[in-house]
Amino acid sequence: MPAATESLPPRAHAPESFHLTLVWIVGSIAALVVGLAPITASLLNDHYTSIGPDAVYHARPILDTVANPSSFFQFDPNADAPTGGLVLWPWTYDYVMSLIVRAAQPFAIDR
């Protein structure tokens, strides 16, 4: 009687979702590296210095909202001086950044 030969089942291929997840992770890391590349241009004597007016403009609504969450506004009296103007971009970025700053306040180091 000949020996029974058992054949192994074909090797299962990685699911398509794993490949997409891997592409997403590699793409995210690449975007992070590219996004943080100019950070050295913002450092002056080991202190972070904002580059351009956009960073300064976002800082004011973020810090105002950190101090008083109900002070978040869609109309900015300081934009388009002297009459003020509507804030044209979505408010989500500034509001979420203010939430992050408020959450990090207990961990702040006093100097």
Image (cartoon, rainbow, N blue to C red):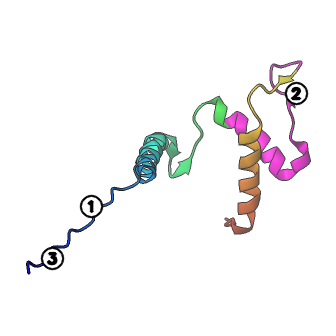
- Say which mark, if any, is on residue 10: 1
Vertical arrangement, residue 22 with respect to residue 49, above or below = below
* Image side of residue 11 versus residue 79, left or right: left
Q: Which residue is mark 2?
A: 77
Q: Secondary structure at mark 3?
A: loop
Neighbour tally class for label 3: few under 14, some 14-19, many 20 plus, Cα within 10 Å: few
Whether label 1 touches label 3, CB < 8 Å: no
Highlighted range, magenta = 56-83
Picture quarter with the N terminus? bottom left
Report if residue 60 is visible in the image.
no
Across and down, in percent, residue 71 comes to 90, 43
Task: Work out whether residue 37 or residue 4 is closer to the camera in this orientation and state it.
Answer: 4
Q: Position of residue 72 (x, y in %)?
A: 86, 41
The question of residue 78 being in magenta is answered with yes
Q: Amino acid at mark 2?
A: Pro
Quarter of the image for the C terminus: give it.
Answer: bottom right
| Mark 3 or 2: the one toward you | 3
Amino acid beneath label 3: Ala
Badge 1 marks a residue whose secondary structure is loop
- Looking at this rendering, what residue extends furthest in the bottom direction? 1
Q: Which mark is residue 80?
A: none
Residue 50 counted in the magenta span: no
The three-letter amino acid code for the residue at tag 1 is Pro
Q: Is residue 54 visible?
A: yes
Answer above or below: position of 109 versus 24: below
